[in-house]
Amino acid sequence: MNVGDRVRLLTGTEEGIVTRLLDSELVEVAIDNDFTIPVLRREVVVVAQEEGKNFDRTAVDYGPGQTPGKNANASKKDNSKRPQHQPAAPKLAQPSLQEALAAAASSGAGVARPVNTGPDSRGAAAASGKQPAAAKGLFLALVHQSPELLGVTLINNTEADVLFTYGEETAARPYRALAADKLGPKTSTKPLSFLHLKDFEAWPAVVFQLLPTKLNGDAAYELLTKRQAFKASTFYGSQKPAPVIGKDAYLFQLDEKAAAAIAPEKLAEEVPATAPAAPAKPAGLDAAALKAQLSGDAPAKPAAVVAAAPAKPAAPVVAPPHELDLHLEALRPDNKEELSNTAILRLQLDAFEDALSRALATNMHEIVFIHGMGNGVLRKEIHRQLSRNKDIKFFEDARKEKFGFGATLVRLK
């Protein structure tokens, strides 16, 4: 049983769609438009698409852009006239690179418009008032399955295959892997999970790992990792026509920075072959005294042996605390010296940099820096340094119910 399967309750006649796998024994099922209920797996059965034909009812196909509530209770007789297949609307042809550059130069908008082969293409575009998505790229699309239910879909609008993994992060669970597959060029996945608009504030952050690949290609690419959280201030303005699927969706590009090709010489890099080492000199011999003895200028006696000082063992790196308080009274509890604001800031940043380097050296998973609200100077400087550190996976405000806006959670690679 997978997300997106149509199921029937064994204890009733209701049918619905699996929107989430809650745990090994429990699933969430959407029935009658947006009404969702948790159901034990043993109390539902997957319904085949062909079953509707045998029972004289319209089979429900829960594909992208569906409206599950309209025919969600498909177990009831539906003797109405079956819908006739309508001719498919002409698909939008994606512009070539030359057409995209020409469109950008002529319109000044910087966004290439798709070439519609239909006769009413210009009128439809003018009526919609929306600009299409970029011509190329990998996109996260939240597609309406019903007015309140969105399906999380991955769109590959490139010419290469893409190996991908999909997972979610919540406050209760740092990461949960939900899907992994290969997506062909110019295709999209079925919904990987479902999100309800009424639960917007509790939506998880989605995490994609993407690896472009092409059979018999002449380049290898680095792995792209993208974490997408959703904020109301930007979410509702992201709705636009999605490539490939040809529907309006809340669209987020995952490869704003395209995967970098790995140079062949870098792929060939291995542990460098060491040149034959020169014969080691006997440790502790005084070379000048030995030479004097061999030349006959010194009495025949053993050369002086210089005792080598024993190397001091390196001090082990101690991991910092999981929550580091950067307030002055926490860093220097016995401090009685009057320090300027600049000196206090320098002291706090030194403590932050030291703790971050020790956290990375000891392979910590995450660390929380408590910087307080104040005038925001310390928080801004910490965020600036974190944004430039390639060893940081991401950072965000820590739990507001505990720290308010006075702490930053840093997730390390």
Image: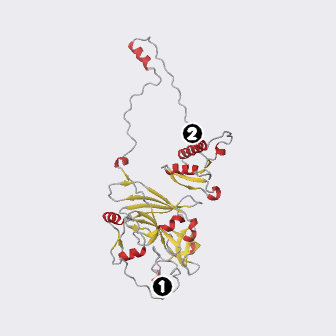
Left or right position of 97 against 169: left
> Which residue sits at x=35%, y=50%?
263
In the picture shown, does residue 174 fall above or below 21? above
Q: Nearer the viewer, residue 160 or 247?
A: 247
**Residue bearing the label numbered 1:** 57
- Label placed on residue 343: none
- Label placed on residue 316: 2
Q: How is the protein colored in the picture? A: secondary structure
Left or right position of 413 against 324: left
Left or right position of 164 against 410: left
Q: Amino acid at mark 2?
A: Pro
Q: Upstream in the sequence, badge 1 or badge 2?
A: 1
Q: Is residue 22 visible?
A: no
In the picture shown, does residue 317 fall above or below 60? above
> Which residue sits at x=55%, y=70%?
197
> Which residue sits at x=44%, y=86%?
82
Q: Residues within 10 Å of mark 1 (few under 14, many from 20)?
A: some
Q: Amino acid at mark 1?
A: Arg
Q: What percent of the width, then of the height, locates residue 151?
A: 49, 70
Q: What percent of the width, then of the height, locates residue 332?
A: 65, 42
Q: What percent of the width, then of the height, locates residue 403?
A: 63, 55
Q: Residues within 10 Å of mark 2 (few under 14, many from 20)?
A: few
Q: Nearer the viewer, mark 1 or mark 2?
A: 2
